[in-house]
Amino acid sequence: MLQLIQRSPLPGLALLAVVLPAQAPAPQAVRLSAVLAAFLPTAGTQTRGLPWTTGDELPIKWESATPVAPAAFEASQGFTMKRTGALVIEVGAERMDASIQVLGNQMGVQQVTIAWQQLSGPFDRASLALAADGVGLRPLKCRRETEPASFGNLVQVAQFEGRTGAALWENWNCGQDGCGFSLTLLYRRAAVDQVECVGGDN
């Protein structure tokens, strides 16, 4: 928008200034390890599901203030409530836009997925960043070496300091437009059993 700000000393000439709209501040980034740790119970506590307010302390832009009904295919997996949002995560030295999806039921949160897009592999950057932050990772199901480069799964046991351990499922899926990558916290063994190793190595 142009705005007249003062008169010029020369007749018939006005000085104009371009008034630019104020820029919104850059979204706050949060480390991947901090997001995952927030969705794990404190070590030694017993819970059937974390409360739906979990994660509200993080810089997540939630699409809804409270959970909503899940999609039909998610409901078929036994989930009755869902919450989704967006955030900027730090994976090692990289910052990237990511989405977060929280699934569960009346008892609370039952599964959490963080996903982002990248041009190509390798797909070990998340594991390397978590290990650098002190997260213990132990192979549980599938092997990165035998999973296809274009589509694969890997499940590891993740142990965060002061938190109850959980299974961490990595999935990558590549197409012509790049690759989608996701990390999912699986709290129950039955959920781990449903993950299939594309390379055929359990």
Image (spheres, grey):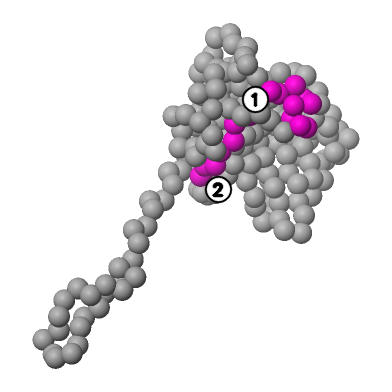
Can you tell which of label 1 and label 2 is closer to the viewer?
Answer: 1
- Left or right: residue 133 versus residue 193 is left
Q: Between 53 and 44, which is closer to the camera in this rendering?
A: 53
Residue most toward the right?
Answer: 200
Q: Which comes before the other along the chain, label 1 or label 2?
A: 1
The residue at which mark 2 appears reads as 97
- Identify the residue at horizontal 70%, vertical 36% (top origin): 170
Q: Is residue 41 visible?
A: yes
Answer few, some or many: residues within 10 Å of disc 2's Cα (few below 14, many 20 plus, some between 14 and 19): some
Classify mark 2: helix, strand or loop.
Answer: strand
C-alpha gap between disc 1 and disc 2: 24 Å
Q: Is residue 16 above or below residue 102?
A: below
Residue most toward the front?
Answer: 12
Name the image quarter holding the C terminus. top right
Name the image quarter holding the N terminus. bottom left
Q: How many marks?
A: 2
The residue at which mark 1 appears reads as 81
Asked where in the image residue 39 lies, by quadrant, the reply is top right
Residue 40 x/y as whole percent: 56, 22
Residue most toward the left?
Answer: 9
Q: Give the amino acid type for the residue marked by disc 1 in the picture.
A: Met
For the residues bearing labels 1 and 2, Cβ distance under 8 angstroms: no
